[in-house]
Image: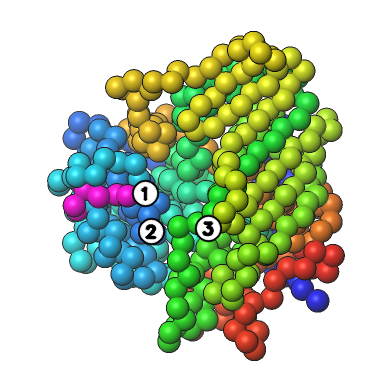
Amino acid sequence: MNDERNTVGSGEPISRRRAIKSTLAAGAIPTALASRVYAAATDRIKIGLIGCGGRGTGAAAHSMSTGQNAVLWAMADAFSDRLRISHSSLMRGKAGASKVEEGSGFGDSIDVPPERQYVGLDAYRRIIDSDVDLVILTGPPGYRPLHFEYAVNAGKHVFMEKPLASDAFGVRRIMASAEKARQANLKVGVGLQRHHQDIYLEAIKRIHAGEIGRIVSMRCFWNTGFPAKTALPREDKTELEYQVRNWYFFDWLSGDHICEQHIHNLDICNWAFGDHPVSAEGMGGRQVRTDKKYGNIFDHHAVNYTYSDGTILHSYCRQIPGCSKMVAEQIVGTQGVAELSTTRCALANGDKTIWESPRNRGKDYQSPYQVEWNALMKSVVEDAPHHEVDYGASSTMTAILGRLATYSGKTVQWDEAIASERRLTTDAESWDAPAPIQPLEDGSYEIAQPGETKVL
């Protein structure tokens, strides 16, 4: 019988309607956590990059493009080739995944000599233990709670990518560290950049103002082909190294693609509704992406989420080539419908347009990837509050809840899921350590079987 891995954790449900309390040890905040105040004109803000893939490289580029005197000071990755490629791309002004204009260059904003380039599973410690001011956490999500916890305890400001965890244990760990960060006046940004995109901000403001009436149902989609991820060969790697190399295809590292990509859509629906769902039921499977090199994740999920007043969110994500593609959200109200996407947002009541985003973005338009960094760095310089973990953790847990429903084939309650003592992940920092899941005799991995797999 299939069974998600088990480790005891602790915690309480997350809700935007109640105060967040630490779920781990309480007590005085160490003096090391005191937030530093910067003089924007003279102080250089030293950035440490932990996780040098495409998203990390892009985040580093945006950190240096805020006009806040930031310098990339140190870099770390589990693998030397990833670090080398990232460093080279940034030095040439190329940051493909970042939406930063190619060839822009960063001049002396990059100061990462070999002695500040760290490699290995424990490389994050060496950056965080150094004199950097802010760390970028863009390694595999399964390690995110560990890295965030260590960074907060060291008194560092943080930008971290979504999802924030791959299981409920990790979400609770994130929330405990977030409370410490808040008490220590540390600034924390989360890579759910639609919260910084002008057309989404305007659309959500109008929804909250009642322009489509009371929300009665929602739909969201992340339907695409295969992701831009290549399954790398095993060669002479240990099992843990092989899985971390291919992190996207293992649920304990990525959370499955419902967490890795679809979280963006789920986040928008939570934002529009003003809370997270209370339960989920759904179905999913592994119909096309079946080769053992694709680890143990599904290639499609369909979930019905129920909110506290009975509103249903119909959620779909699929990674199968040749199918129709859609990445969007739809919010249905008693007096109209909101159609939302990164390229166009509109509110309408039948044939009557209530509001539509401008078709021309204008010469002053900035990518939300850049705007989220502008906001974070401004808060660091001006010592203003900046804490995005609450909605990041809530949306992460929403995605996890959906995965639990599709893996098990059962209705899963939020309160049961967030309190679950099952843990998928490991804090291992040696390649010789055992991986949380092991291959079967033929080299494949056990796949969740709805109706059989236990998730709680």
Residue ID at (64%, 89%): 441
**Structural distance between the alpha carbons of marks 2 and 1:** 9 Å
Specify the farthest residue to the front: 322
Foreground residue among 171 and 439: 439
Residue indicated by mark 2: 53
Which element is circle 2 on? Answer: loop
Front tag of 2 and 1: 1
Are circles 2 and 1 on residues that touch, CB within 8 Å? yes
Residue indicated by mark 1: 97
Which residue type does callout 1 highlight? Ala
Residue 29 location (% of width, % of height): 52, 47
Find residue 226 and name its label.
3
Crowd around label 2: few <14 · some 14–19 · many ≥20 (10 Å): some
Asked whether residue 206 is drawn in magenta, I would say: no
Q: Is residue 293 left or right of residue 277?
A: left
Residue 35 appears in the figure: yes
Residue 262 location (% of width, % of height): 60, 47
